[in-house]
Image (cartoon, helix red, strand yellow):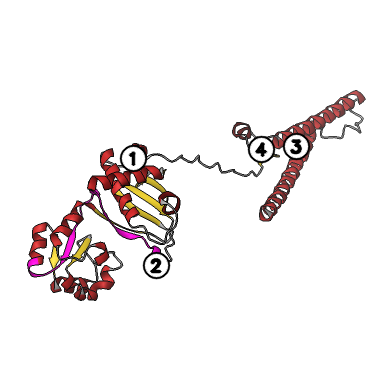
Amino acid sequence: MLSRGVQSTAWLSQLRGVQAVWRQAASYSAEASASGAAADAAPSSSPAEPTQAQPAETAAAEAAAAQAATVSAADAAAAAAAAEAAAPVWAAHTGVKTLDGLPMPSWIVAVPKPKRSPMGLQEAIKAVQAEARAKFDESVELHMCLGIDPRRGDQMVRGAATLPHGTGRSVRVCVFAKDDAAQQARDAGAEVVGDEDLIARILESGGGGLQFDKAIATPEMMPKLSKIARILGPRGLMPNPKMGTVTSNVAAAIKTMKQGRVEFRADKGGVVHAGVGKCSFKAGSLYDNAGAFAAAILAARPKGVKGGTISGYLLSASLCSSMGPGIPLNVASLVHAAQTTRKAEA
C-alpha cells in the first residue's frame, strides 16, 4: 500500500505541474488577445489627448469603444479558460473522472468468476462435450488430486490402466525381442521389432526420429537395453516390469497397448493426469473409460495413506477437454463409476 501511495503522490505532482503550465499559457494567450483587440480598436493617435483638429466628443467615443473592446477580450479569455478546465466530451460518455480536463487515476477491481459447483460424472461429460469448440477433436482429460506425500517412497502412486474403449489415438509399439518372440510380435501388429541391430540404430541416432510410442521387451533383452537407457528413459519409453512392459507374452502386451493402455504417475503435487478419450466418443464410452481409470487409481492406493477413500485418499477431481475449462467432479460419483467397472470386469 505504501508503494501505491507514493506512486499516486508522484502522479498528482506531475498533474499539478502540467496544470500550472496550461494556466500560464492560457493567461499569456488571453493577454495577447486583449492587447491585440485594444490595438485594433484604438486609433493611431491617443484618444486621451485629442488633437486640436479632433473634437472632444469624438475622442470620448473612441475611448469608450476601446475600453469595451478590452473588456470583451478579457471575457472571451476567461470563457476559453473555463472551457479548457471543464470536463471534455469523452469523459461524459465514458464516466471517467477528470481534474482540469485530465483523467484521474483509478483502481481496477478484479471481479472473480463464479466457481462451478461439483457435478456428477455423467453431467460433467455432457458439459465437456458441449463446451468443446476447437477445430480438432479434443481429448477428454481426467485429473485427480490424491492425499499422498510424493516425497515419501512408500506413498508414490504409479501404474497403468486399460481403457475398455481406447484413448482414440493410434499407438505405435516397439518390441525388443529375438527368434520366436520377435515373430509373435510381428504377427500381433508391432510396428518396430528388433534386437541388437535395433539397439545399435537407436544408439547411433542418439534417439532422434524414434518411430514408436511404447516399448516392450522380453526378459532376456533387458540387460542389453542398458546401453540406450539414457535415451529411452527421459522419453518414458524404457520397459519396466512394474508397468507390465517386460514380459514373455509379447502378443498379449501388444494387444493391451493397442486397445488403450494409459500409464499414470503422481506429480510433485500429488495430482494424477490422464486422457480418457476424445470428445467425439459417446458419453457412455467416456463414462466407462473414466471409471476404469478411477478403479486403477483406487487399486494403487498406498498402505501408508490414512483416512477413507474420499476423505483421505481421493480428495478432488475435475474433468476437462484439451482447450476447455475444468469442471469439478463429485468424488462420490467417480468412486461409483469405478465400482461399476470392477463389477463389470468380474
Indicate whether residue 166 is drawn in magenta. Answer: yes
Residue indicated by mark 4: 97
Q: Sort mark 1 into few (<14), some (14-19) or many (20+) by Cα contacts within 10 Å.
A: many
Residue 158 can be seen, yes or no:
yes
Percent coordinates x, y for residue 32 in the rendering: 76, 40
Mark 2 and mark 1: span between their CA atoms? 34 Å
| Nearer to the camera, 266 or 297 | 297
Mark 4: amino acid: Lys
Percent coordinates x, y for residue 242 in the rendering: 27, 65
Q: Sort mark 3 into few (<14), some (14-19) or many (20+) by Cα contacts within 10 Å.
A: some
Mark 3: amino acid: Ser
Q: Is residue 85 left or right of residue 309?
A: right
Residue indicated by mark 1: 125
User: On residue 67, which mark appears?
Assistant: none
Residue at 20% over, 61% down: 212
**Eye-nearest disc, 2 or 4:** 2
Residue indicated by mark 2: 153
Mark 1 and mark 3: span between their CA atoms? 76 Å
Residue at 87% over, 35% down: 46
Q: Secondary structure at mark 2?
A: helix
Mark 2: amino acid: Gly
Mark 2 and mark 4: span between their CA atoms? 60 Å
Mark 3 and mark 4: span between their CA atoms? 32 Å
Q: Secondary structure at mark 4?
A: loop
Are the two marked residues, 4 and 1, in contact with CB atoms closer than 8 angstroms?
no
Residue 240 can be seen, yes or no:
no
In magenta, the rendered stretch is: 153-180
Q: Secondary structure at mark 1?
A: helix
| Nearer to the camera, 141 or 153 | 153
Mark 3 and mark 2: span between their CA atoms? 87 Å
Does 259 sit above or below residue 287?
Answer: below
Pointer 2 or 4: first along the chain: 4
